[in-house]
Each structure stands twice: as C-alpha cells, then as structure tokens.
Amino acid sequence: MKPSTDSNKLVSIVGAGLVGAGWAIAFARAGFTVRIFDADPRISEQAIPWAAEQLQELKKHGLLEESPRDVSARLTRVATLEEAISGVSYVQESVLERTDVKRQLMEAINHIADEKVIIGSSSSGIPASAFAHDLRISPRVLIAHPVNPPYLVPVVELVPSPQTSAETVECVDSLMTGIGQSVVHVRKEIEGFVLNRLQAALLREAWALHRDGIATCEDIDKTVRDGLGWRWSFMGPFETIDLNAPGGVADYANRLGPLYYSIMQSRTEDGPWDPQLISQVESDRRQHLAVDDLAKRRDWRDQRLMEFAARRIKRQ
Amino acid sequence: MKPSTDSNKLVSIVGAGLVGAGWAIAFARAGFTVRIFDADPRISEQAIPWAAEQLQELKKHGLLEESPRDVSARLTRVATLEEAISGVSYVQESVLERTDVKRQLMEAINHIADEKVIIGSSSSGIPASAFAHDLRISPRVLIAHPVNPPYLVPVVELVPSPQTSAETVECVDSLMTGIGQSVVHVRKEIEGFVLNRLQAALLREAWALHRDGIATCEDIDKTVRDGLGWRWSFMGPFETIDLNAPGGVADYANRLGPLYYSIMQSRTEDGPWDPQLISQVESDRRQHLAVDDLAKRRDWRDQRLMEFAARRIKRQ
C-alpha cells in the first residue's frame, strides 16, 4: 500500500490495547496520521513502541513499502479525549468490551465531537444499539469489528445499528477498503455478528465431539488444519460447496442437504461448556502445548499469519 | 516422498471415479504398485490417463520427486475384482455412496479375499457397520474417508466399526501416515464422522444467516476466507482458541463460553434447506460465478490447493 500525501488523512484511536494499537498500524501503514489515546496513560505509552516493533516485522515479511520509521512517525500519542477527537474524520474505539464502558465513551464523544466525525467500534459482540443509541452522534456510530491483528488479517465486519445512517456505512466501507481491509456487511444487528456466529457453530460441534469421546482435540484440529480449513482459507464455505457438485450449490444442496440436516438434528440439548468439560479440553491441549510455551507459540502463529498475508498481497 | 523399492507394496483401488483415481495417485506417488478396478470399464479406462495428467501438474508444483511417467508406470488397470484383490494387502474402495452398493461389494470381497487383506472405505457418511457387518472380513474393514483430492489434501478419517479390530486401525494408520496422509481417529461411529459434522455445523449457521437477510453468500465467504479461515488452515479451532486467551483454552472458555452458548441458543428450530432458500443461495452464487465458469474455477481451486500443498511440504 502506498502512503497518501493527503493532509486530511487523520484518524483517531481510542483505547490503545492490542486491538487499538493494531488498528493504529493498519491506518498508519496506509498513510494516515493517527492520534492514539487511552484513559490509562500506561497503556498508551506502550502502544507506539509496540507498533514500531510490529512494523519491523511487517517490513521483514515484505508487508511494508516504506521504512518502519516513516510509518511510526505518523503515530502520535495524545493525552486527552478532546485532543484525540478534535478535527478528525474517523475514530476507531477499542475500549473494554463492556456496555457501560462503551456507553460512557459515546456520551463523552457526543459531548465534544463536531458534526462530522464517524465512530467505528471494535466491539466483537455487543451491538451499537446497546451503547450508542439516542445521541446526537448515533447516526454516525457503527460496529467495525476486526480480527486481531487487523494489520494482518483483513476482514472487518461493519454492523450498523437501526440508528446508523446509510451514509455512515458507505463512508466506513470506503475508508476500510482504502486501507486494504476486506469489508463484510452485516445487515441487521445479531448477537456475535457473522464471524463469531460461524465460529460458535463450529466450536460447539467440536466441543461436543470431544465431550462424547469421538475424537481428541488434536484430531479435531487436524481435521480442520489438514482438511476443511484449506479451501475455507481462500474460498469460504459457500464457494467451497458451489464447486463441489457438478451443477453448483443448488445441486450440492439437493444431494447433501438431507445429510447435513440429519447431522444437525442429532446435535440437540447441548448445555454450556461445563467446568468438567473445560478441564478435559484444557488437559488435552496441555499435552500438546505447555502453558509456558503459549507465548512462544503465539509468536509462531503471528509469523505464519505474516506469511499468509504476504502471499495474499503478492497474489493481488 | 521417496519411492520405496519394497516389492510387497501393492494396493488395490476398487471404484475408479474421481475419488478412487485420486487415491491411486496418492499410493503410486509413495512408491506403491496400484491395481485399478471399476465395475464400469469406461470409468477405469479413464482413470490412468487422468492420473497421468494430474501427475504432470504435481511435478510442475514441486509435489513429485520422480518423473510423472515413472509414477504412472505403477498404475495397472485390471478387468475383474478377483484380479484386483488377489494377493494385495490393502484395498481402498470408492464405489457409489449407497449402502446396498457397498454391501454388495463387501460380500463379493468376502467371498474371494484371503485371510489378510484390509479394506478401507472412502465412505463420507455411511459407517462401516451399515455395510460390512457380520462377514469373515468384518474385523478388517474400516472407513478411511479422504477429502478430495487425497493426493493434495492430506486429512483422512479412520472410523472403525464395532467389529473392526484394533490391529486393522493400527495397520491402516501406519499405511496412511507412510504415504503422507494426516490421520484422524474417529473413535466411535457417528453420522458424518468429524469432518462433515464440523462442516455441517458451520454451513447450517451460514445458510441461516443468509436466509435471515443478515449477510450475502459473498460476505459470509469473505468472513471465512479473509478472517476465520486463516488460523484454522494451519492450527485448527482448538489451538486457535488456546492461543486467544492469556491462560489458554480454559481461560478462553471461561471468558467466551457464555457468549457462544448464548449465540447457539438463539439458533433453534432450523428446518432443512427448503427449495426457496436453495434457489436464493443459488442465485446469490450465480451473480459471482456463472454456471459455465464452474469448471474453470475448479481448475483455479486445484491450482491453489497445489500451492497450498507445496508450501506444507517445504515447511516440513
């Protein structure tokens, strides 16, 4: 992505933990000047040095055209919410995933923001109508839910509340597409949006298969990482089945719909994951990866995601 | 994979459609001599020329050490089931996915097979107990369910029936691991095994989200191919969540279990995919890919799978 020289390219990050700082990288890399604010100064202090490290890694993997230093130079820490919001066109909020915390922030922004600012929320499950309703800014608030880290994994779910204007959705679509994200439109508010609903459905079955002694965690993981996950990682589930029957998806549904229906009929009456099941799964996982090795494995994962991202960009 | 010079490496493919011919490639590439039989001689006639073409592609992608011709030379078409079975240690059956057809084949094999032959079935949903019960060979029959094509996507689900011996499972595990497949043990018979159950769970949610106007097929596909699918394609769902909370999978389950439970509670009373919904999804997909372009897109998919497989092998 080439940096822009447009001086109006100014956004603000509110909430500078992992998600917020990740967004800061995604915007700065695309040429935006980024103000970073967190109510806890210890958190915002760490954000820019952390981002600088990630930018080095991105450079190594061919994911950055400019020098990491030039990109870092577009990140500025600010001390107050007023400074963060003043004069910016877009705010990405990534504060704690709690309705009261997000509502409080929206009220504060409502108090100080001008007529034009648009606010995207990184909320991964709480819909905007739960915390951004009935404010002057309500038409300009929507969910912009990323996968972490947003500078590597491109998907972003845009979820308007009933009070969000169509213009706001359009505007954030352009902004996100412009910085290289892959925009998914969630057309109605629904718990978990699309991404976590799909994940919930697959996880529910995975946990139940483990609980019932059908397969180990490792074997369930293998089924996905050495099988199902390959096509999904470049086509998604609908295109996968569309190509899996001679006549396309309707042909596929007519052939295999009854089997899938029967499978799902047989999975009923699942309770929540109870402590015993959780401890079974924990113990199964710990046989493959010690708690002390989690951090190292996360680094490995991030390296793999960078390779993945690098291949995507080459292909485009 | 290096070819073996062991002259006992002899297997038989019964049912030589796409799946059977795909298995023939997987075995021949690993140094096995492969006999190919189909009750319909027009099908078995096509199998070897088709395999030869695929072997050329594999060579191009660095997925074949030998020359395609040398590997092809290990494929032999035979005219009768007797010829196919006689003296081989392993039979991979990939006949039509119908209980009566598979039962008939098992009875025929039971009649002619020696004391040692082991039979793996490519059945993607019918368990072995439905068609291989109460025969002399029953202890030596199990499901060995691949993803198509098995010479690219490594996963294979081994599903014993209650009559299958532990020795058989162990033996097929070694055989499959030896030719480079990734073995998943499904410890009890269950409809759809593990792979199609996980797929069914995700597809059910995907179809319902489309039906309810939450997102288009394309946006649901994007959510997976530009988001969820990345981690799943190299880690699987359990390792993904294990790394997504500071303390590992139990920590994750305690934080997010209630959300997932609530999401799945909200998805009840789903009927089968009805004709109207099927035609909606078909029409949505056809806006992105015309029926006439399905074949070309399948070639594209297979190229991508080859690149995927090539990267996996390099990494190992």
Image (tube, coloured by chain):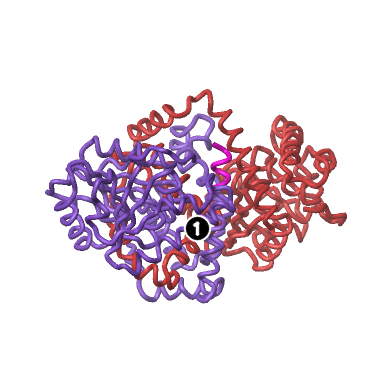
Chain colours: A red, B purple
Report the quarter where the C terminus of chain A lies. bottom right
Tell me if I can see residue A127 in this picture.
Answer: no
The residue sitting at 77% across, 47% down in the picture is: A29
The residue sitting at 60% across, 43% down in the picture is: A101
Asked whether B130 or A217 is in front, the reply is B130
Q: Residue B40 sits in which quadrant?
A: bottom left
Q: Residues within 10 Å of mark 1 (few under 14, many from 20)?
A: some
- Residue A9 in percent (x, y) is at 82, 54
- Residue A294 in percent (x, y) is at 53, 29
Is residue B199 left or right of A41 when viewed as pictured? left
Pinpoint the chain carrying mark 1: B
Q: Is residue A180 magenta?
A: no
Asked whether B117 or A33 is in front, the reply is B117
Q: Residue A72 sits in which quadrant?
A: top right
How many numbered discs sit on the rendered protein? Answer: 1
The residue sitting at 76% across, 60% down in the picture is: A116
Asked whether B61 or B283 is in front, the reply is B61
Residue at label 1? Answer: B54
Tell me if I can see residue A49 in this picture.
Answer: yes
Does residue B76 lie above or below A302 as drawn?
Answer: below
Q: Is residue B312 magenta?
A: yes
- Residue A153 in percent (x, y) is at 62, 48
- Residue A232 in percent (x, y) is at 50, 54
- Span colored in magenta: B309-316
Secondary structure beneath label 1: helix
Tag 1: residue type? Gln
Tell me which secondary structure the magenta stretch mostly adopts: helix
